[in-house]
């Protein structure tokens, strides 16, 4: 699905910020322009997980081991990842 952005000037964004925020909460996106040039994007907040739980981490390691075989250690995987 294509994303539609609305363009607003910085003065309008300042004076109508609360209205813009309500619309952003409903999924709309805005590009704020300064002198006709894009300067910022106002988009809905999407929380990002900042860490994995222990069960998620062990699941990831188990999946990796099944893909590469039991003969590869976690240390080797870490060292290989650093090379990339």
Image (cartoon, helix red, strand yellow):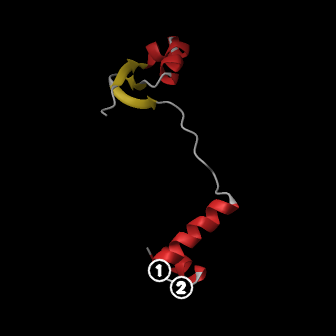
Vertical arrangement, residue 72 with respect to residue 63, above or below: below
Mark 2, residue position: 72
Rendered image: mark on residue 51? none
Position in image of residue 76 (x %, y %): 55, 83
Q: In front: 65, or 46?
A: 65
Vertical arrangement, residue 61 with respect to residue 79, above or below: above
User: Which residue is outermost to the front?
Assistant: 66
Name the secondary structure under disc 2. loop
Q: Measuring 52% from the left and 23% from the top, which residue is drawn there? A: 25
**Quarter of the figure with the N terminus:** top left
Q: Measuring 41% from the left and 24% from the top, which residue is drawn there? A: 30
Question: Dot 1: few (<14), some (14–19), or many (≥20) neighbours within 10 Å?
Answer: few
Position in image of residue 23 (x %, y %): 48, 18
Q: Measuring 41% from the left and 31% from the top, which residue is drawn there? A: 39
Q: In front: 69, or 51?
A: 69
**Quarter of the figure with the C terminus:** bottom left
Mark 1, residue position: 68
Name the secondary structure under disc 1. helix
């Amino acid at each position: 699905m294509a994303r539609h952005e609305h363009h607003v000037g910085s003065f309008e964004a300042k004076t109508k910020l609360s209205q813009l925020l309500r619309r952003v909460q409903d999924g709309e996106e805005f590009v704020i322009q300064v002198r006709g040039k894009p300067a910022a994007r106002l988009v809905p907040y999407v929380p990002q997980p900042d860490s994995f739980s222990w069960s998620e981490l062990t699941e990831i390691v188990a999946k990796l081991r099944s893909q590469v075989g039991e003969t590869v250690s976690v240390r080797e995987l870490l060292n290989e990842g650093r090379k990339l």
